[in-house]
Amino acid sequence: MNRRKSNKKIIIIFSCIGVLFIIAFTSLFLISGIFEQPEYLKPWQKTYSQKFDDPRVRLVSHGLLSSNGHNMQPWKIKLDKNNPMIFYLYTDSRRLTPEVDPNARQMMVTQGTFLEYLKIAGDKLGYQTTIHLFPEGDYNEQELSESMKTKPAAKIILTKTNSQNDPLYNFMFLPDTNREKYLPTRLTSGQIMKLENVNMDSDISIKIFQDKKNTGKLNDYAMQGADTEAGVNRVMTESENIFRSNEYQKNKYRYGFSMEGQGTSGIMMHLMQGLVTVFPSMNSGKASSDRFIQSTRTSVENTPAYAMIITGDNSRSSQVRSGMLYSKLILTAHQLGLTAQPLSQVLEEYPEMKNPYSSIHHDYAPNGKTIQMLFRLGRPSKEVPQSMRRDVMDLIIQE
């Protein structure tokens, strides 16, 4: 009799524990917003641009998908009132990340990635795009933020033409960055040649490395950059402040970082989102720094090749043109069955990064040249989810 009572108590205890686990997991999923519709993913749909009559807005909705620093999507568009075939791209100075990008170099590279997506979409939709960089002159560097508000980064002129079947177009709808492990397969000579041949700018060079000496050295530089950045609290805090921990936040802000950027999706993503929402310390401070370092280490240890985009100077025009080239490179990489991930920490220009920044430039871009992009290349071991995107109409300046 006592044994029966004891067994019954054990069953009740385990049943209660099971119920508590179910309640806890259900609560985490609800806190994550598992039933919330992901409005922030709608711009990735190929039909998204079709709901707009203005061809300029249709092209901008494609540019919105381009790679951009910290997923800040720092673009503003001014539609010409007098000419329906002209519009202007402005750098959105409200989206500067001054701690990690104090000279706004990455911000200007991001303007270029956007412009190249516009061009490719234009070819597909039957519009030739003529792009004039800084049509009203260079920024006033002493008052950069204000200057960005008044001077466009580019003037875009459309000319109606026949639609061209650009083979890169369909790859615009794939995630631009994959932080997962890459397969150890080396790039073929044909792949390298095709990647190098996308560059038509004599002032910019592409370098691709897959030999043991250079990949080892670049692994070290990537880790130096990550270790340095992880130790600078103000830089890490800037990133933490734009982390969206659940579906409600992602739909509200539609820019910044999220669990998708860490390669998490499905049920596990919702579980982690619920936990991070309830326990924010899981994604801040030392926990965030440690996760960032470990993620970088996993990436570099599973990287068969690196690539660089190098310019002869560090002018604003060179920065934008580098971004345009980067877009062509990653789309061509997708076409070749490859994927990419920027490892830009060692290229950042705040004081604590001075030594590794100087060292990598001494080794790979001497005589005043600038490495605008450093990124890993390879065949993906798994697919990754798409990241947040804003509604295209949020980019349009309403006058």
Image (cartoon, rainbow, N blue to C red):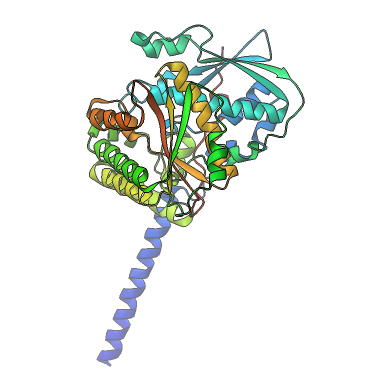
In percent of width and height, residue 191 lies at: 55, 44
**Residue most extreme to the right:** 162
Residue at 54% of width from left, 9% of height from top? 135
Relative horizontal placement of residue 48, taking residue 30 as reference (left or right): right
Classify the position of the N terminus by image quarter: bottom left
Q: Is residue 274 above or below residue 171?
A: below
Relative horizontal placement of residue 355, taking residue 146 as reference (left or right): left
In percent of width and height, residue 129 lies at: 65, 20
Residue at 64% of width from left, 9% of height from top? 81
In percent of width and height, residue 383 lies at: 51, 51
Residue at 58% of width from left, 29% of height from top? 117
Find residue 101 and report its image quarter: top left
Relative horizontal placement of residue 349, taking residue 260 as reference (left or right): left
Report how many numbered discs are placed on residues in the image: 0
In percent of width and height, residue 165 lies at: 72, 34
Classify the position of the C terminus by image quarter: top right
- Can residue 54 be seen here? no
Which residue occupies the foreground of this view, 320 or 371? Answer: 371
Which residue occupies the foreground of this view, 104 or 261? Answer: 104
- Can residue 18 be seen here? yes
Find residue 158 and report its image quarter: top right
Q: Is residue 139 above or below residue 339?
A: above
Which residue occupies the foreground of this view, 304 or 243? Answer: 304
Which residue occupies the foreground of this view, 87 or 186? Answer: 186
Residue at 40% of width from left, 10% of height from top? 146
Q: Is residue 104 above or below residue 19?
A: above
**Residue most extreme to the bottom:** 1
